[in-house]
């Protein structure tokens, strides 16, 4: 499989290069040159397969040329063998039509493990063949950092530098990062906000001297391999609920538009997806874009669902590209306009194309708390705030009554214990696999939010390319 950039001028690359590159050289994002399409019979043949076998069937065409089926299976077995539930992403029924798919049974308790556990193994496999050393630099408001660190700790030929805003991530989130003491893991607490940390990462990527010395890459969801791994669970759930004969809808708590874009890919591959419900909190740029074509960024309002406190959703660019005839030159123009004014209008083709599959909703704090309380009292399920936003949108979505709706449960409730306790009166307990988190030794540097401090720190510790 070959990949092209959404901005039309970066070179076409194979899966291996796309995985190691992250962002395309023209500032765009890589997407497959064409979508592999499954026939009804091929979807029906997924019935009864394990998660790993489903993963191999769904991902094999995307990795073609880089990995054969046996290699892909070996990596999936290693990645998903670390999940604490035998179904990997179990489905739970809430009422006659509402379902949950629990994506948080991985090592760091959020859905990001599903993709990052595989990505860590892909990095290791591809770097083993090359004479290069990779330097991963990222900024996190919580979940991405811990999932990326767990996936990369101790792996050969890769160092990870993860910046988090000092004092602004939860204690569970901080400890999940800072108690990983492997020598290739470097945690940096920035004296500033998440936006400051993010800006420092971008500046280091954009600095020619720095990025010519080190082969730097990103592990946020601009990396195609992450999205690819997330396509799998849409197939896995839909087949269990009656696909290909019966269509299924999904409600997705959305921030950077990565998880729900994977659902779009599944639909393009032939999975009968009745609706993709994009659930946002009050940081609602995606809801405004999908309901009225207005994609304009404001300032971020902190909420109880911090992983969705985002104003610019990087992966939305992939959707806009695919919906507007895959014209990279036109999209590059549209995105440049957005980058200079922080606002743009969707074209008619983009707006109408999106409306065929997507619905959206904006969930306020009160409705989020109510969904949490409903799930607790009616189905005995404790939800985290992100999942509760998804469920609130699912319960009031305009979807035909005979279509089951699956809400993606993106984090374990114990990761956001305070918010859960406020809405339900119940304090969720951390699962045994992370139970001694509060007794482990922590290690991290504290740095001022300046370019020189951060790049100087990294340059002293990273291995040149
Ligand atoms: C990252 C995250 C999201 C948002 O996912 P996107 O792919 O960025 O849309 C939602 N919930 C949780 C718990 C997350 O960690």
Image (cartoon, grey):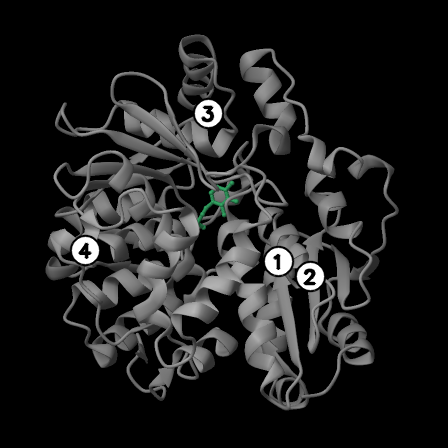
- Frontmost of labels 4 and 2 is 4
Crowd rating for badge 1 (residues with CA inside 10 Å; few <14, some 14–19, many 20+): many
Q: Earlier in the sequence, mark 3 or mark 1?
A: 1
Q: Earlier in the sequence, mark 3 or mark 2?
A: 2
What secondary structure is marked by label 2?
A: strand
User: Where does the image place residue 297, in percent across and percent down from the top left?
Assistant: 39, 53
- Frontmost of labels 4 and 1 is 4
Distance from Cα at disc 3 to Cα at disc 1: 29 Å
Q: Which residue is mark 4?
A: 42
Q: Earlier in the sequence, mark 4 or mark 2?
A: 4
- Frontmost of labels 4 and 3 is 4
Crowd rating for badge 3 (residues with CA inside 10 Å; few <14, some 14–19, many 20+): some
Please indicate whether residue 285 sits to the left or right of residue 215 in the image: left
User: Is residue 84 at all visible to an observer of this figure?
Assistant: yes
Distance from Cα at disc 3 to Cα at disc 2: 30 Å
Distance from Cα at disc 4 to Cα at disc 1: 33 Å
């Amino acid at each position: 499989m070959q990949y092209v950039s959404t901005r039309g001028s970066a070179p076409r690359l194979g899966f291996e290069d796309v995985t190691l590159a992250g962002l395309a050289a023209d500032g765009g994002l890589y997407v497959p040159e064409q979508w592999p399409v499954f026939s009804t019979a091929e979807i029906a043949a997924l019935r009864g397969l394990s998660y790993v076998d489903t993963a191999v069937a769904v991902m094999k065409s995307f990795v073609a040329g880089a990995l054969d089926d046996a290699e892909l299976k070996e990596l999936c077995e290693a990645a998903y063998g670390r999940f604490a539930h035998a179904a990997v992403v179990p489905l739970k029924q809430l009422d006659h039509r509402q379902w949950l798919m629990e994506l948080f049974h991985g090592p760091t308790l959020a859905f990001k493990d599903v993709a990052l556990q595989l990505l860590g193994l892909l990095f290791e496999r591809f770097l083993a063949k090359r004479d290069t050393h990779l330097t991963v630099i990222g900024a996190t408001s919580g979940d991405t950092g811990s999932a990326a660190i767990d996936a990369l700790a101790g792996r050969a030929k890769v160092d990870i530098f993860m910046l988090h805003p000092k004092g602004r991530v939860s204690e569970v989130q901080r400890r999940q990062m800072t108690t990983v003491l492997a020598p290739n893991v470097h945690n940096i607490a920035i004296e500033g906000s998440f936006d400051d940390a993010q800006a420092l990462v971008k500046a280091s990527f954009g600095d020619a001297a720095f990025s010519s010395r080190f082969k730097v890459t990103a592990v946020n969801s601009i990396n195609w391999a992450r999205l690819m791994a997330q396509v799998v669970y849409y197939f896995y759930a839909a087949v269990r609920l009656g696909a290909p004969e019966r269509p299924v809808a999904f409600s997705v708590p959305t921030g950077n538009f990565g998880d729900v874009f994977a659902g779009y890919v599944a639909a393009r591959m032939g999975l009968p997806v009745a609706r993709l419900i994009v659930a946002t909190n009050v940081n609602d740029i995606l809801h405004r874009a999908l309901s009225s074509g207005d994609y304009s960024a404001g300032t971020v309002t902190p909420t109880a669902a911090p992983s969705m406190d985002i104003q610019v959703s990087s992966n939305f660019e992939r959707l806009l590209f695919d919906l507007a005839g895959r014209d990279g030159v036109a999209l590059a123009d549209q995105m440049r306009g957005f980058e200079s004014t922080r606002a743009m209008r969707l074209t008619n083709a983009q707006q109408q194309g999106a409306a065929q599959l997507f619905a959206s909703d904006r969930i306020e704090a009160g409705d989020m708390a109510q969904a949490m309380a409903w799930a607790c009292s009616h189905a005995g399920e404790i939800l985290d705030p992100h999942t509760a936003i998804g469920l609130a949108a699912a319960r009031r979505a305009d979807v035909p009554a005979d279509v089951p709706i699956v809400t993606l449960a993106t984090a374990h409730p114990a990761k956001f214990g305070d918010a859960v306790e406020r809405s339900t009166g119940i304090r969720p307990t951390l699962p045994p696999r992370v139970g001694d988190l509060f007794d482990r030794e922590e290690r991290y540097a504290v740095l001022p939010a300046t370019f020189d401090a951060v790049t100087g720190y990294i340059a002293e510790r990273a291995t040149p390319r």
